[in-house]
Structures are given as structure tokens and as C-alpha cells.
Image (cartoon, rainbow, N blue to C red):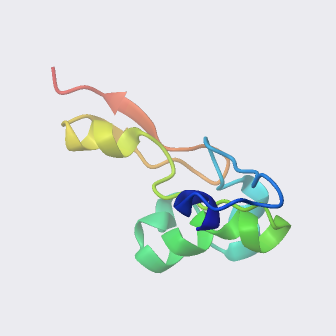
Amino acid sequence: MSALSGDLLGEVPATCVTQVGTVEAVGAVSASWSEALDPEKMARLGTSLYKLTGLETTRIPFCLTVQAEALGCKVELGKIDRTSAVVGAPL
């Protein structure tokens, strides 16, 4: 929050901008990709890297299929070792 407010920091926080729901995290917090539609499980998986490794990041939603699905694309939710994927377009 200090960084967002423009305050000086003692260190630059590290983050992962593409993914936080690793296979190891899924197992550790008992929340798989397909289960992460549940808000509680989504929050557990989205904050897992901070809780498991101290990496100062959280990320929800987990991928860009949310936008594609909203535009009418067919989406597969993925598995423990595979993220969601667009599998069909409306046109």
C-alpha cells in the first residue's frame, strides 16, 4: 500500500504478474483451478504465494479467459497442472 501511495520504500516489492496458482500451491491450499470459481477457494489460491513463500503478490482472476468468456468464447476450466483455456469462439 505504501508503494501505491507514493511513499518511499526500503526495498522494491517482487511480484509475479502472470500466475500465482502453481501446482504446488494448488496442493498446499486444497483449491484447484476448477474449484477456484468458489470465492473462498479463489481467495486461498490467489494469496497462496504470499502465504507459502512470502512473495508480495496476490492475483485474481488467474488468467485472461475471464474476458474471453464474457465476450462469448467457450472456456475449459483447466486441471491441477493446466490453466483455463479458450476452446471455442462465438464467430
Judge left or right: residue 8 versus residue 39: right
The quadrant where residue 26 appears: bottom right
Residue drawn where x is 72% and y is 62% of the image: 56
Counting from the top left corner in percent of width and height, residue 20 is at 66, 54
Q: Is residue 71 above or below residue 59?
A: above
Looking at the rendered structure, the number of numbered marks drawn on it comes to 0
Which residue is the extreme one toward the bottom? 40
| Residue at x 42% of width, y 39% of height | 64
Q: Quadrant of the C terminus?
A: top left
Which residue extends farthest left? 91
Residue in the image at 42% along x and 73% along y: 38
Q: Is residue 54 left or right of residue 75?
A: right
Instruction: Give x and y (percent) for residue 10.
Output: 83, 61
Going 58% across and 64% down the picture, which residue do you hit?
Answer: 46
Image location (x, y in percent) of residue 2 = 62, 66
Q: In which quarter of the image is residue 18?
A: top right
Q: Position of residue 60 (x, y in %)?
A: 49, 58
Quarter of image, res 4:
bottom right
> Which quadrant of the figure contains the N terminus?
bottom right
